[in-house]
Image: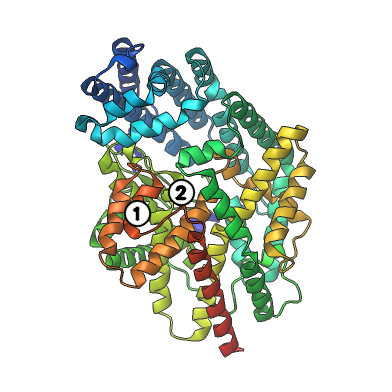
Amino acid sequence: MPDNINAMLGTSDILWRLEDLYRGPDDPQIERDMDTCREMASRLSADYAGRIASLDAHSLLGCVMGLEGLSSLLAKLSAFAYLNFSTRVNQPETGAFLQKIKEFVSAIGKEVVFFDLEWAKIPDDKADVLLSDPILADYEHYLRAARRYRPHLLSEPEEKLLIEFSPVGHTSWISLFEKVLAMERYGESGRTQEEVLSDLYSPDREVRKKAAQELTCGLKKDLHVLTHTFNTVLGEKMIEDRVRRYPEWISAMNLSNEVDDDTVAALVEAVTGRYDIVKRYYNTKRKILGLETIYDYDRYAPLPYMPREQVSWEECRRRVLGSFGRFSAEMEEIARDFFEKKWIHAPVETGKASGAFAHPAVPEAHPYVLVNYTGNLRDVETVAHELGHGVHQVLAGEKGYFNSQTPLVLAETASVFGEMLVYTDIMAGLEGPEERLGLAAAKIESIFATVFRQIAMNRFEDAVHRMRRTQGELSAEDFSRIWLDTQKRMFDESVTLTEDYGVWWSYIGHFIHAPGYVYAYAFGELLVLSLFAMYRQGSEGFVEKYMDLLRAGGSDTPYALLKPFGIDLHNPGFWKRGLDMIDEMVRDAQRLADTIT
């Protein structure tokens, strides 16, 4: 079936060119680059280990630039290994190569861990004097940010030991998780997870119900492995948080994102306090669909007015580039490179990772985008989303490797904005209230998935991390009970969750890849809704300020980077602006529904 979809949509040959990194796992340049990494690490250790406290600004700059060069080369090796693996998850040799690179990166990291430890120990007054020197201006934020981990660093032998064990720790469980789900086949026809999930958007209720049953059945077959994997990740994080003295399970993620605990708490409180928007929307949808009850497998059912066109890859390209170009010629030009220079992998294939992502690779090369394109309008928005990431990563790369690392809470800025550009253009091309309502409903549900669902998942994570720390390992039934409880609070009886839905926590990769990550989606969505409103209202100089924001990457804190827009993330009321916009979108949809019925 994947071959038929790909041929019909024109995606069969939309394959990325990893040769821009390496020609293949057996490329001799890989071993040469690994040798270079060893030499660089050895030289950095010989020149600077034990001497960081005595360096002047010029010498500190030389050290940091050396570390950046090494980190970038390691990132290039890692990016190639992961991208190569992501389209061949079911091939043992690609997994073995990925593991080899992980172990190599770990070994090199052990050699240069001295820098973070020694730099963090320098007294604040001395560090401030060094960082006031203009010669370090390009790295000032990077160096200041590195010091925020000061209370949580261990001794050098302990840090080296943790790095030594890391390849067989968390990252190995990520690989196992991805392999299990990528190799699983669902239903009698042996479909991929991506194909089954796409059926949840079918207008035919029986198709949706069957898809839900097939997904549930497949997940239950693997539930013992997935439950053990989740428990191990929870346990490992519990231990690491304890030895690093993090007060809460979410503290490390907040620190990484450079946001205060109070900011995240205010976000969670604001979103959970507006679950009424979700309830009101789904009660309206139930009436439009003429159903007595909306079950979990009905959540994404398209309204009968939803445009059902199948969008070819070429048409998707035209729409996305057109929307980007109407906003910014520079954004369109960068996005065009992804299509023309083979930076995208689009077809649905057996053994390919599900979902979609944009990988930044390294500034010296370029990002890559993976999608599983099935041709619906939702997929067009997904392409826009990932290309938004890609544009962001290209622009941020101008700052160099260290400063291109955008905090997760801002990492969704360009992706969600890109989606909104495409959605707005598609909506403008629709004339009748029926199709406008159909598309608006699909967009509302997408926003719900990014805001309310992600915060509900944050509440799930919060509960399971706390339970793991107080009561030991969780059973599959524990996970399912907490999952249903936190999801039910969001829907507030507007959607009936079946018992089968209780196991759907087990396929959500973010819980494994980056514990605590999911709130960043809600953060980014609400932020972008506010930014998009400024754009639509004709805010002076908006496009230039927005592109400068993307270009800034991670060169300052989120609080500082958003100041040009007049946004104060310390103000708990900020989140109300985005939530009010969602509320108004739902009210508009209700008004459209009234005109039709």
Residue nearest the observer in this picture, 40 or 28: 40
- For label 1, the residue is 563
Location of residue 331 with respect to 184 vertically, above or below: below
The local secondary structure at tag 2 comes to helix
CA–CA distance in space, label 2 to label 1: 15 Å
Residue type indicated by callout 2: Val
Say which of marks 2 and 1 sits in front. Answer: 1
Other-residue count near label 2 (Cα within 10 Å), few / some / many at <14 / 14–19 / ≥20:
many
- For label 2, the residue is 409
Task: Examine the image and state in which quarter residue 488 appears.
Answer: bottom right
Q: Residue 189 in the image: x percent, y percent?
A: 65, 54
Residue 570 in view here: yes
Residue 192 in view here: no
Task: Examine the image and state in which quarter residue 57 appears.
Answer: top left
Left or right: 187, with 413 as reference point: right
Left or right: 391, with 459 as reference point: left
